[in-house]
Image (cartoon, rainbow, N blue to C red):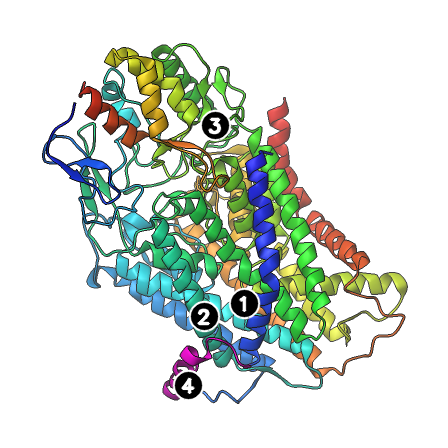
Amino acid sequence: MDFYSAIQYVLFVAIVTALVKPLGGYMERVFSRQRTVLDRFCLPVERLIYRITAVDPKAEMTGKEYATCFVLFGLAGTFLLYAILRMQQFLPWFFPQYHTTPLSPDLALNTAISFSTTTTWQAYAGENTMSYFSQMVGLCAQNFLAGAAGLAVGVAFIRGLARQLSDTLGNFWVDLTRALLWILLPGALIGALLLVWQGVPMNFRHYAVVTTVEGTQQVIPEGPVAALEIIKNLGTNGGGFFNANGAHPYENPTPLTNFLEMLAIVLLAAAFTNTFGRMVGEPRQGWLLYSVMLLLFVCGLVFVDYSEQRGFPNIGNVDSLHSRLQSGGNMEGKEVRFGIGSSTLTAVVTSNTATGSNNSMDDSYTSLGGMVLLVNMLLGELVFGGLGTGLYSMVMAAAIAVFLAGLMVGRTPEYLGKKIGPAENKMIMLYALAAPLVVLPLTAIAVSTRMGLSGLTVNTGPHGFTGILFAFTSCFGNNGQSFAGLSANTPFYNLTTALAMMAGRFGLAIPALAFAALSGRQRNTPSTSGTLPTHSLVFGVLLTTCLIVMVALSYLPALALGPVLEQLLLGR
Amino acid sequence: MGSDNRDDGPVGNSVPAAGDRPGAVDLPQAGERSVDPWQGRNGGGFTADRATVFGAGLLSFAPSAAGAAGYDATASGGSNLSPTNAQLMARVNADVAKLQAENPGAATPVDLVRTSGSGLDPDISPAAAQFQIRRVAAERKIPEAEVTRLVQENSEDRQWGFFGEPRTHVLELNIALDERYGRLH
């Protein structure tokens, strides 16, 4: 590991850790409707919104009502975005000579579902498909709305664990509005200004035609990039303005923008653990979850950095050693300004946080590097994870760990004073089984049919298999990253990935909300000397081990056919 | 040495007005915000223009997989070739052979034989720049120390001392070479 990369990683972790408490506290005050610094600006707007939409902010919803609102909101967003995309040629800022890729029904549907579930899987290239209007009013808007919806579900989940003898989990519309007005919009405004300062474009100019030094002509796309760029990261969405996403010099011009964008992704998700701890009355519970996340995050950094640094294929007379003048390593698919260090940071951050706004091409990663990114997603997008969703993913995993511990010592498992009985177990089972039940069969269908295999246009063999597994895992986890060598703009992939995305979004949120609702109805059991403490080092180790074992049990055969096989073949 | 029709760019560097020199890049004129690090900086396709770069006293960019001919800004993207892909091996071997023939001596730095993630990377590593100094000096018949000095002027260290990697801005460097020593193409 390069010295300067190490500084960057340490600084990143230090800044995130330092901001967990202040941001966590701020978010807690926002969602508990206590006083905050932004009230002067946000309260009038909030009141106006409730007046226009006829929402009663004091009315609370049961778990079922909350989930229904969440699903309907997502579907409404999908329909709206589908309409905008299909009518793109009649809307402003459509350039027929450049926007040449048609938005077919299956592509538009896939994109609509993708953006309204925060997946932002892109089976298209932005600069030759999407008009500025679609990017702004369609995609960027969904980034905000879907991100806020995820955060709302996260808060409702926490309330279920925090409350007792209560039927309600809060008001979805209030949580959504507050997430937007107090958290996402201010954060996006500040972040966008920082990005513009560093050179990210923000204009509505027609594509520029320039004459180059060698005398040829070059067409350069422009657009309202900064606006999309910040919320794509802040809302843990990940879909870029251009095809190259974070590798594009317009989306990510300098190493500093890269660092800031990665901070934007992780800060809210990490701080949410502190919000969780505060709302359940025990901040150290939040810190325990954060520590487990941090451990897994740092492991990912170390493995990927190591693998990519030594990674370029063994070809004579190529100097890929690290030196004062070059970063060296596996630079295929990576940018010079980022080298190995910044690329690793981004790859690990984006694969862990269901974001998918990578600044290097995952398909060109080494087998071990790509495997770590895949495992990050298979863990369940809970190492910081998506906005709101990461937290309940980690808590559901903690519930499994508690359950296993309870089996070992013969006591009824309980988490934060809430007993995990048969009803709760059913929800946990639904939650835990959803991923393998969706990802593995879809991968199997794709690799055994001609429709699926026809997507492998660049890399075949074990690496191709990894790419397909990666695609479905990414879509289920609402990540959106891909091995871009997979040609996924076919009806087969558009429909199967859309299915995976919806399963991952609603198929996880609904059991989680049900679990929270069941917990909310219980009375808290006072902790005794026999209660398993869930804030201790022992529990942290137990939780980490549980996570690794669950991934291994479900996915080791698949990993053996993909990255492991590829690595073994390389050694011959 | 230089033309006398110069506009001063917003950061005080002399920017020749595009009208003077046919084929010059239209860089932002005075008064326009030029925080854009990439606007028009790109020099054109590697494969398409290899002939003009070699022999023209210019440094070449890395290969690009953006579009069919490379450096197509309306089709950004990488090659997505995995390290175990035979196509990658073949491409790298071919590029290494060509570059070694043109720039004999040291081993080829890795970023000159790889395609970047965006296909539009405006930078090369200082090692890659150093690799090409001898060829460029020989083509222009000027001392290597002069080219080295220009390379250093157009290179940037890690941002704020530790973010990212050191890099050389190829387009600015090529424009500086053309300004100071005349065009060969």
Q: Position of residue A291 (x, y in %)?
A: 69, 56
- Which residue position is annotated with label 1? A506
Residue drawn at x 66%, y 72% as measured from the top left: A278
Select label 4 or label 2 by which is in front. 4
Instruction: Say which of A185 and A386 sits in front.
Output: A185
Residue drawn at x 41%, y 88% as measured from the top left: A54
| Residues behind callouts 2 and 3 on a single chain | yes
Which mark identifies residue A326? 3
Residue A54 within the magenta-colored segment of the rendering: no
The first of marks 4 and 3 along the sequence is 4
- Which stretch is magenta? A33-52
Q: Distance of mark 2 from mark 1, alpha carbons? A: 9 Å
Circles 2 and 1 in contact, beta carbons < 8 Å: yes
- Which residue position is annotated with label 2? A74
The first of marks 4 and 1 along the sequence is 4
Which mark identifies residue A47? 4
Amino acid type shown at disc 2: Gly
Instruction: Say which of A364 and A510 sits in front.
Output: A364
The first of marks 2 and 3 along the sequence is 2
Select label 4 or label 1 by which is in front. 4
Q: Chain of mark 2?
A: A
| Residues behind callouts 4 and 3 on a single chain | yes
